[in-house]
Image: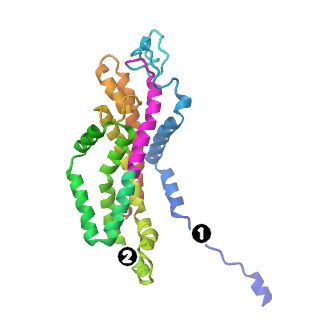
Amino acid sequence: MTSTVLDQKPAVQPKPRRGKWSKLVRRFVRNPWAMVGLFLLLLTVFSAVFAPVIAPEPPDKADLRARLAPPSWLDETGKSTHLLGNDQVGRDLLSRILYGARISLLVGVASVVIAMVIGVVVGLIAGFYGRWLDDFFMRIGDVQLAFPFILFAIIVMTVFGAGLWKLIIVLGISQWVGFARLVRGQVMTVKEMEYVQAAKAVGATNYRIIRKHVLPNVLSSIIVLATLNVAVNILLEASLTFIGLGVDPSIPTWGGMLADGRNYLETAWWVATFPGIAIMITVFGINLLGDWLRDELDPNLRI
């Protein structure tokens, strides 16, 4: 009997299931477009963080003798030493583009954080409690959506003046409705699930139910919307700065460089072209990541 027991092979232990995030990482690595998006975004982040190190000159250093100098690889005379050329007052374009990445990322991320915090809180309250709270917040959202954003931005920036943080606040306040409606709709579905009803039955408080059971189940959709809105806000910052309603002209921004270069498209195309390419690369990379996140995290698209 003893030998029989000893001769038996131990039961094979089942392999532990890999977590959701490890599977997500594997699918990400297998998706070439997602990798391209991450590379482009990291390139912009690297440029913004290390701008003081890799910029050849200070972004505000002017040299009228090098006014509208072409890129060094286009200058047949060999006098130009600037890789991307100079602008209308002789400032190095590469340096200004590197420093401009800081402003674009700051505006895009900070404004989305403001909109996300306001929208998620409002959406959780409106969706979970319903009734008059739902009607109150959603009617405020309807009024804001009926008001054109560009008109709202013009009024605010004209009354209070242009400025970096003013622009961030305007973008954040104008976009909370999208987060609120998204979260509200999903919360109204999640709160009817059996595990939520079971938590209520055992006496869990509303705060604990929202924090432990409701919010984690709507978080993936929030991440997707936030990622895509970062790209939108980078474009909006460039657009508002282009028409003089955004960041102060003394601060190097991609939108400001586009505005400076529009009068020199025929004689010095590089002044506006390279900042435009920087905007395109950044927005393209973020959109690729956002599209992949939407495909992976949206349960309706995973069916």
Q: Residue beneath label 2, please?
A: 193
Q: Which residues are magenta?
A: 88-113
Q: Residue at x 79, y 86 (%)?
A: 3
The residue sitting at the front extreme is 160
Mark 1 is on which residue type?
Pro
Quadrant that contains the C terminus? bottom left
Q: Residues within 10 Å of mark 2 (few under 14, many from 20)?
A: few
The N terminus lies in which quarter of the figure? bottom right
Task: Pick the residue in front: 140 or 284.
Answer: 140
Looking at the rendered structure, the number of numbered marks drawn on it comes to 2
Q: Position of residue 112 (x, y in %)?
A: 38, 49
- Main SS class of the magenta portion in the image: helix
For marks 2 and 1, give the CA distance: 28 Å
Give the image location of residue 75, x and y in percent. 44, 13
Rendering quarter of residue 254: top left
User: Could you tell me which residue is drawn at 22 percent across and 42 percent down?
Assistant: 151
Mark 2: amino acid: Met
Whether 244 is drawn above or below 73: the answer is below
Q: Residue at x 52, y 55 (%)?
A: 25
Would you place residue 114 above or below residue 101 in this image?
below
Query: Quadrant of residue 140 in the image?
Result: bottom left
- The mark that comes first in sequence, 2 or 1, is 1
Provide the secondary structure element on which disc 2 rests: loop
Residue tagged 1: 16
